[in-house]
Image: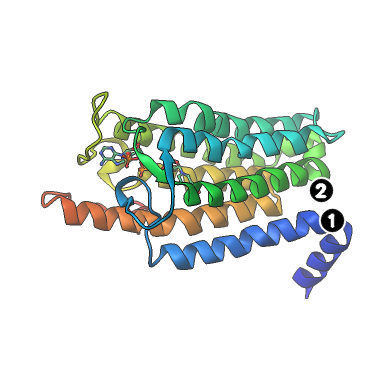
Amino acid sequence: MPFIEAFNDSLAAHPLYTWTVLGVVVMGIIAFLVLSFISAPYGRHLRGGWGPTMNATVLWVVMEAPSPLSFAIVYFMSDNAFKPVPLILLGMYMVHYLYRSFIYPFRMRGGHKRKPILTGGLAITFNIANGSTNAFAITELSPHLLSTAWLADPRFLVGALVFAAGYAINHQSDAILRNLRKPGESGYKIPHGGFYRWVSSPNYFGELIEWTGFALAAWTVPAAVFVFFTAANLVPRAFSNHRWYLEHFSDYPKDRRALIPYLL
Ligand SMILES: NC(=O)c1ccc[n+]([C@@H]2O[C@H](COP(=O)([O-])OP(=O)(O)OC[C@H]3O[C@@H](n4cnc5c(N)ncnc54)[C@H](OP(=O)(O)O)[C@@H]3O)[C@@H](O)[C@H]2O)c1
């Protein structure tokens, strides 16, 4: 079986990397199973019984910052760090995660809310594993990324466009949500406009498209595993959010889907 041979080769050459990538796959499977029955206890699904909590804005920074930090540390340990294609992939990763870690938390309205520390702990574990394995695969394990010929490869070109489209959808959707509240407000309203015409969680839809584009452009195993984990986490939450809207707003648009326009 070529897959088992590739796994054994990788395990022999890079045991820590291989076990970490496998660990993210296992975390994704567990996350999907658990979140299909239990909504992650933050935001509109916040409830008691999940241990100590802390300020949501602070926890966002603490749990997301390990992603760009671990990526950057592993990335810049490599002799290939200043090659053009890895630099572009570094830029794609950072443009998302520097915003998500250090700007987004301070722009949220209602960030004074609490969030269970447990959710942050799980996110930190994923973010360190994901950031470091992606950086390692890009700089050390992917000969195709070390030549500028990759910049003309359809996988890179389509991937970069898909990434940009996902990034735009994610940001537009988060901005629509942010503008639903005036400063100091923390209640919920029905969002309209952008991809909210079609789905209840277009921010998650954009996030999934973004990392699918990144995986195409990078063409590495950890980037594909990143998409899998993101889907395992966000698909069940998109359904929880959709159900929540239908239960809380009698005038909620009935033709809106949960996550993917016209499909899901
Ligand atoms: N890669 C991943 O695995 C992953 C995982 C999680 C999140 N993310 C990304 O992180 C971002 C935030 O995720 P999230 O789960 O926190 O998103 P969310 O539940 O949609 O909430 C985003 C923000 O909008 C507010 N909000 C949501 N619905 C609202 C409504 N109907 N009316 C008024 N305000 C509303 C929320 O306030 P409250 O906090 O008060 O509810 C929060 O501040 C998204 O872009 C998502 O894609 C990525």
**What quarter of the picture does the C terminus occupy?**
bottom left
Residue at x 51% of width, y 46% of height: 120
Seen in the image, is 75 located left or right of residue 239?
right
Q: Nearer the viewer, residue 122 or 15?
A: 122
Query: Do labels 1 and 2 touch, CB within 8 Å?
Result: yes
Which coloring applies here? rainbow
In the drawing, what numbered circle is on residue 141?
2
Residue at x 44% of width, y 31% of height: 105
Residue at x 31% of width, y 53% of height: 241
Q: Nearer the viewer, residue 179 or 159?
A: 179
Determine whether the residue tagged by mark 1 lies in a helix, strand or loop: loop
Kind of residue sitting beneath label 1: His
In the drawing, what numbered circle is on residue 14?
1
Q: Position of residue 113 (x, y in %)?
A: 34, 37
- The answer to whether mark 1 is within 8 Å of ligand 1 is no
Q: Callout 1: 10 Å neighbours few (<14), some, many (20+)?
A: few
| Mark 1 vs mark 2, CA separation in Å | 10 Å
Q: Position of residue 142 (x, y in %)?
A: 80, 46
Q: How many marks?
A: 2
